[in-house]
Amino acid sequence: MALSRDDAARLGLKPGDTFKLDLGAASMPMTVAAILPEQANLSGLAITDIATAQEVLGRLGEIERIDLILTDAEAERVAAALPDGVRLEASAQRSNALAQMTRAFHTNLTAMSLLAMLVGAFIVYNTMTFAVLQRRPLLGTLRMLGTTRSQLFALVLVETLALALVGALLGVLLGIAVGAGLVQLVTRTINDIYFQLSVRSLHLAPLSLLKGIGLGLGVTLLAALGPALEAARSQPRDVIRRTRVEGQARRLLPWLAASGVLLILIGLGLIALSARSMGIGFLALFLVIVGTALLMPLAVHGFASLTTPLFGRLFGTQGRLAARGITASITRSGLAVAALAVAVSATLGVSIMIGSFRASVSDWLANTLTSDIYISAESSSGASRGGDLPPELADQLLALPAVEALSQGRSNRIETRDGPVLTLALESSTGQPRGFRFQGPTAADLWPGWQAGRLILISQPLAYRRQLQVGDDLELFTTSGWQSFEIGAIFQDYGSDSGTLILPRSLYAEKWDDPAVSSFGISLADEADADAVSQQVETLLAQLDITTSVQTNRAIRELSLDIFDQTFTITKVLRLLAIGVAFVGILSALMALELERARDYAVLRATGMTRGQLRALILIQTSAMGLAAGLFAIPLGLAMGDLLISVINLRSFGWTMPMQVQPQTLISGLVLAWLAAIFAGIYPAIRAARAVPARALREE
């Protein structure tokens, strides 16, 4: 047997060494004949000749696949000459099946990345606004010297483009570094859910790098249009008159809010019209987020106006000044609150989706796992079907004193017209299988028809992806060719997003010529100790020299939920990145706000306010902004959670679940927004308190 260099190094083997190869319920000693070079790129595979493989796997005379290089005309002739039970399949179809399995996973990661980019656009806006405000006197001087508005506009955009190019290049380098750290999380998730994947090195596609740079430049230029227009439209005499700008901004607030409502309505309309489109679903979610963000400046203005008396009673004059300062600089404070609220709402929405998903999976496991102990044999050499267990094991297990019932199962991947689907063939010693929760209507004679082999059960994801309903026929490729089976019921299933179908084992053994068993489910008496019986089962298997997996019901539930939590680790990391981006955004907004109000703060200092009181005023103001962001994030987070569950999750994986909201999730979002604003306001508060009042009051 030949092994890849990576596998040999991991196992500590060299040519001539002997190792034990576990084959489901049995094991066999094998000798390393050769080490494959790294260029072969066969990590995770063991290579041997066909005769040895047939002997080792106990499948003498069997061949699973023959690879051919054919023209289209030759392929037609070969397909016509094939006997029943054999089909011709293009190699691209198998690759496409793997790509389809991970498409939804890739789409969701892309959506989270785009969300972080949306929040980043707020940072660019605030940063360029800060740069324009810093040089307002210089810009006014340039206008008085003859510089046109278009030249000032171009000046700001060219500067933004230069900074964007540097930022995009640094972002690509940082993205590569972050990607190297996250690749293991993604690989582990794919291994847990889809198939075994070994990643030995980063693959840097030039097109992906160019797309990253292009997106960075495009988003930056779009976000800089506002500051560039602000720099260009001011008259020389107005460049230092902030009240004029804020007056214009307040008049625009109702129009922005109306635009936001329109975008939200368009997004909801797209959801109703988009049917099953994933891309349109994400576009609708994006429009809802942007529309809500446009509503927030008006909402912030109203929040500050309504809470001014409250802050006055709580913090006195400083509280009133802090609340009024938010409305006085609504162009900065409104956008800062919007950026933070969008980031926190994304965290809330994803948390609600994950929490609802986890609760549904836990409930599904409790309903599906009806046996107390499960025995399974691993598949051999990556075969599509499960490993074999000896048939006499069933009688020996039933002979154990605490065992009341035994179910037998066989797993395999069966071909349909649209690709392979996971199939479970079940047989229960009590007759009718248990643990199914059906969605929608079922056939009138469901269980008699299923036992007779006329009806099959399919999972909800399979029904959604193939657009199947109860009463429809599904063609399956058997050993005698294609045969149609009527769908008797659709059951809830979170075990596979590609779909699962359930057959009676007798039917499966007849149609696919596979009478073997790959798993047992043991039901115990009420007073029996599952752990003690599990030890008895392991002792029995050891006496029979059978290597299998023996797990209790409780252990399977715990392992499944652990895998669930690991699956969403990458999502949690991306959420933290989005919050980090929002933190930088609100920091830049507060810096711009501090620069704009430098003269106001100087007047307060000159009239007797101490540095400590000024720092407290600014921190009260940032606290109010954080509180507003947290409060506004709650309804947006609930809407995002609902859309993620009922639209995105359904279209990605075919799963449905009820939305479940935990109060602590909403409270944590509110606290997160408040803490982010407080920490972002510390440096601007210190900076404003250290400023010299005379310098800020001086005018040219």
Image (cartoon, rainbow, N blue to C red):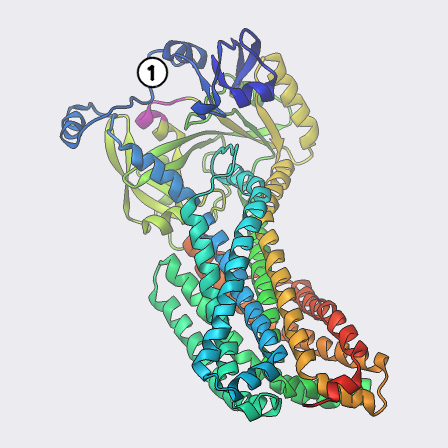
Left or right for 482, reference 147: left
Q: Which residues are magenta?
A: 509-515
Up the image or down, 204 lies above or below 396; here it is below
| Residue positioned 66% across, 79% down in the render | 593
Residue sitting farthest toward the top: 16
| Residue positioned 39% across, 67% down in the render | 271
Q: Which residue is mark 1?
A: 62
The answer to whether residue 479 is visible is yes
Closest to the observer, 324 or 496: 324
Quarter of the picture holding the C terminus: bottom right
Closest to the observer, 365 or 432: 365
The answer to whether residue 253 is visible is no
Closest to the observer, 667 or 240: 240
Q: Is residue 511 magenta?
A: yes
Identified by mark 1, the residue type is Glu
Rendered location of residue 638, percent (x, y)? 56, 68
Q: Quadrant of residue 101?
A: top left
